[in-house]
Amino acid sequence: MDKEFLPFPRSRRVASEALRFAVRRHIVHGLLEADITEPRRMLKDTRGSDGHPLSLTAYIIACYARAIHAHPAVHVYRTLDNRLLVFNDVDVSTFVDHPDGQGVPVPHVVRRAHERSVREISDELRAVKAGSHPLGWLEKVMPLASHVPGFMRTLTFSLMKWFPGLMKRIDGTAQLSAFGMFGKGLRWGVGQLYIHTVGAWIGSMVPKPMAYNGGVALRDCLHLTVSINHDIVDGAPGGRFVGTFIELLESGSLLEGEIPPTA
């Protein structure tokens, strides 16, 4: 038998309907590089509640959320009555690898991520992966979404688009996904913003010659993509946000105090 028919997964129905919303928007993508040699060195000396070093993803989320909070112009949403709603709290929607490493990644929203330490976020993400964290709205809704009629899913996406408060409750206010965990050789990943105004897509981390101390050295280069809805956000505010994000990522300042003193 030279071919085989497989059922179309219900979970992909939800994704394809969400992407219909994404293609109607004008999204600007920026391909970026960050020298995270120093933060990676610092992370190796940290210890989370499970005894392992703190999560690099948690560190990136903490930097990302603080950069958004510092530049609220990229954290705005258009409402049904044609006003702009600015959120003060940065709730980052992300995905956590499935416990068995084989299933569909678990959706999760890190609430008030701009106020959380790297340690707190790292412990929360690992608790979600282990199945010991209380389910949030997104985790509860996603398994059910594929079982409702298509028109109801479309209606839900429309309501989330025009009523940002509903979107915040269900899917947070900013998006982040780690493409780098999938396959080898992938540098940058470009995702789609189906409803959020700002998103970050984490690509690979590889040793790479980079400018350092007035010369060139082999450094740990993180490839990442930042996406912004240009229907709402202008290029200048977006550029300032990106500058702050990269500065926080490279400095390692959010890890200060996380390294236990040596005996």
Image: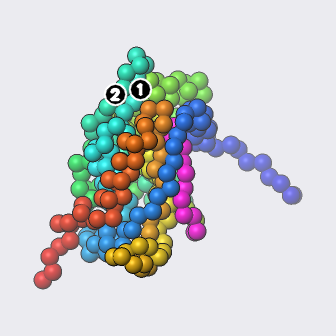
Residue denoted by label 1: 78
Q: Crowdedness of circle 1 by 10 Å Cα count: few (<14), some, many (20+)?
A: some
Give the structural element (helix, strand or loop) at label 2: strand
- Was residue 148 drawn as part of the magenta stretch in this picture? no
Q: Whole-percent x and y of residue 172? A: 37, 39
Q: Amino acid at mark 2?
A: Leu
Q: Tell me which segment is drawn in magenta.
A: 184-194
Is residue 137 visible in this depiction of the protein?
Answer: no
Between 84 and 156, the one lying in front of the other is 84
Give the structural element (helix, strand or loop) at label 1: strand
Residue denoted by label 2: 85
- Was residue 189 drawn as part of the magenta stretch in this picture? yes
Magenta portion: prevailing SS class: loop
Q: Circles 1 and 2: CB distance less than 8 Å?
A: yes
Spot the residue most to the right.
1
Residue at 51% of width from left, 43% of height from top? Answer: 28
Q: Amino acid at mark 1?
A: Arg
Measure the alpha-carbon separation of dots 1 and 2. Answer: 6 Å
- Figure quadrant of residue 71: top left
Whichever of callouts 1 and 2 sits on the residue coming sooner in the sequence is 1
Spot the residue most to the front.
214
Between 28 and 190, the one lying in front of the other is 28
Residue at 44% of width from left, 65% of height from top? Answer: 222
Q: Whole-percent x and y of residue 18? A: 56, 36
Q: Crowdedness of circle 2 by 10 Å Cα count: few (<14), some, many (20+)?
A: some
- Figure quadrant of residue 88: top left
Q: Whole-percent x and y of residue 187? A: 54, 63
* 237 displayed left or right of 253: right
Residue at 32% of width from left, 31% of height from top? Answer: 86
Spot the residue most to the left.
263
Rendered view: 175 above or below 80: below
Residue at 56% of width from left, 27% of height from top? Answer: 154
